[in-house]
Amino acid sequence: MPDKIRVVHYINQFYAGMGGEDTASVGISVKEEPVGPGLLLKGLLGDNYEIVATIICGDNHIAENIEEVCGEFAEIIKKYEGQLFIAGPGFNAGRYGLGCGAATAIVTEKLKIPAVTALYEENPGADVYKDRAYILKTGNNASKMRGAMKSVAAFAKRLVEGDVIEDGEKEGYHGMGPAIVIDYSVPACKRALDMLLDKYNHRKFQTEVAMPKREDIPVPMLNKPLNEIKLAIVTDGGLVPKGNPDNMVPTNSKYFKNYEFGNVDRLDAADYEVSHQGYNNAFVLEDPNRLVPVDAAMKLKEEGKIGDVLTSYYTTAGVMTPKEVGKKFGEGIAQDMLSKGVDAVILTST
């Protein structure tokens, strides 16, 4: 029977059952068994894999000493002869996510063994390390643990088996992933010809230069003079009527709203409040026109520089709202504005 693949798993103090913020500064410890979510990971990896060590580290400790701590992780992995490293998943936990991303990147680059983690797209760890490590996409909290760990285990096994990993959009990871390892002892002309033959013969191959995929958004053009347009105002700054009648959440928005302000020259501070957690909104509470510039728009209309102003504004809270959700909001707002004859938009942010 072949030897089992030796796995090292990293988790924070919370998932190790040591506590929350009160123990976030604890240093590194190791248990020679699966711990917490590692028990789920063990079952998903199957009988050919063995979690030989669980590295536990407080979120503050790793976030404040990234390079040093990840270097210690690497030494621990070497000590246990690790053949696969898995971090987290860290979901949307900021310091934990930074630790997961950094550790996965450093293990990938220094130890050259398969390594993977999973983070929510708004996690800073995903943004910082997405082009240095495999960071799978996942939901924003631990209620998604089983699905996230299932994806991690399946992806990890593919890495161990040497499967060809395609681009992130197709495979479900953030960014470009780690740099492709190239055997420079083989001349570039031969490597290129080998890839061409593999492609021609429908064999799996991996390009040495993975190009990012960006959505092609055409530049919008006005079809009438400015003095004839109807202008609308949209904000992601969370301005809502007093009392927040639709319970607009301050983070991770689920919807946008369209609120009438009627035939007025400016918004009155007594009628509005802010539902948004990501900025100092004191100036908006003093004068909501600084976020939703009805006063400036009405002045333009009065001066004849624009034709009309839509007497309602669109609002949501942008903080922690995923890109794909924001895209759906944009499509919904655009469709509603088209139905109301809007020609141009001012979008204000924080």
Image (cartoon, rainbow, N blue to C red):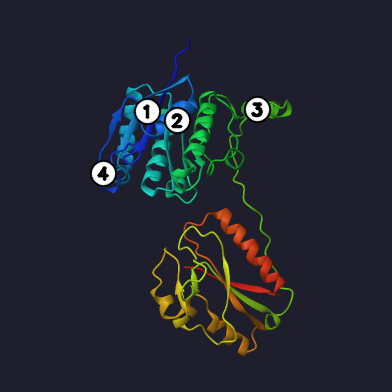
Secondary structure under tag 4 reads helix
| Residue for badge 4 | 23
| Residue for badge 2 | 41
On screen, residue 30 versus residue 309, left or right, reads left
Do the residues under discs 3 and 1 have CB atoms within 8 angstroms?
Answer: no
Do the residues under discs 3 and 2 have CB atoms within 8 angstroms?
Answer: no
Secondary structure under tag 3 reads loop
N-term-proximal mark, 2 vs 4 = 4
Which residue is found at the position 53% from the left and 24% from the top?
185
Q: Quadrant of residue 77?
A: top left
Residue 154 visible? The answer is yes
Which residue is found at the position 66% from the left and 58% from the top?
217
Do the residues under discs 2 and 4 have CB atoms within 8 angstroms?
Answer: no
Instruction: Report the number of numbered marks.
Output: 4
| Residue for badge 1 | 34
* Crowd class of label 3 (few under 14; some 14 to 19; many from 20; radius 10 Å): few
Do the residues under discs 2 and 1 have CB atoms within 8 angstroms?
Answer: yes
Look at discs 4 and 3 and give the one toward the viewer. 4
N-term-proximal mark, 3 vs 1 = 1
State the residue in front, 40 or 116. Answer: 40
* Crowd class of label 1 (few under 14; some 14 to 19; many from 20; radius 10 Å): many
Which residue is found at the position 49% from the left and 23% from the top?
46
N-term-proximal mark, 4 vs 1 = 4
For badge 4, the amino acid type reads: Thr
On screen, residue 60 versus residue 172, left or right, reads left
Which residue is found at the position 38% from the left and 74% from the top?
282
For badge 1, the amino acid type reads: Pro
Secondary structure under tag 2 reads helix
| Residue for badge 3 | 204
